[in-house]
Image (spheres, rainbow, N blue to C red):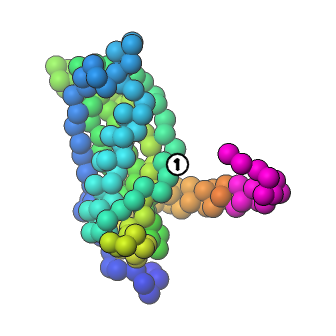
Amino acid sequence: MSEDKVGSRTVAESQAERSEIIFPADSNALGNLFGGRLMQFIDLVGAVAAVRHCRAIVVTASMDHSDFVAPVHVGDLLILKASVNRAFRTSMEVGVRAMVEDARGQTLRHVSSAYVTYVAVDREGRPVPVPCVVPETEHQKRRFADAGRRREMRSEETKRAREIRAELGAGWHV
């Protein structure tokens, strides 16, 4: 653990859950939830887990990976569950799983998963250290290890993007 870390917390201490009934205003012409609205729900529940973990303000740094596995329909009960997979110096990777609950059959259908990175900041927006994550179950330990691999891949992608921008020079604009 680095010296500027601030203690540690278990995965269970930061878990968050959110439930939403899907209404027509949240859907497209086919009656399916807008992907962007689902991403908003994912970001919100992920932020709650991150705040619970670090006890600080958090900002979204990236939504690293988002899979839309199945549609969510008007009238569906959407359940989102989030937990911190791993904490680094000032950032945390949060895994979010979205499911639709069939209230009559009492079953859950997986509809989406995402990994969101949050950075803890102070009131001036400066990054602050976050506690370590203590994974307890085998599942949590696997997610902890996987988060480390994803961080390495993100770092390589960032480095490559910088190199490409440098090669293109000042004449390149978005």
Residue located farthest toward the top when viewing the structure as drawn = 30
The verdict on residue 171 being magenta is: yes
Quarter placement of the N terminus: bottom left
Q: Is residue 9 left or right of residue 125?
A: left
Q: Position of residue 133 (x, y in %)?
A: 37, 68
Nearest the viewer among 91 and 168 is 168
Nearest the viewer among 27 and 17 is 27
Q: Position of residue 17 (x, y in %)?
A: 24, 46
**Magenta residues?**
159-174
**In the rendered image, is residue 149 in sight?**
no
Q: Residue at x 23, y 42 (%)?
A: 18
Nearest the viewer among 171 and 131 is 171
Q: Residue at x 43, y 64 (%)?
A: 119
Q: Is residue 150 left or right of residue 110?
A: right
* Predominant SS of the magenta segment: helix
Q: Residue at x 31, y 47 (%)?
A: 44
Q: Residue at x 26, y 25 (%)?
A: 22
**In the rendered image, is residue 118 in sight?**
yes
The verdict on residue 22 being magenta is: no
Say which element carries label 1: strand
Q: Is residue 67 left or right of residue 24?
A: right
Q: Position of residue 131 (x, y in %)?
A: 36, 73
Image vertical order of residue 29 relative to residue 78, above or below: above
Q: Which residue is mark 1?
A: 64
- Disc 1 marks a residue whose amino acid type is Asp
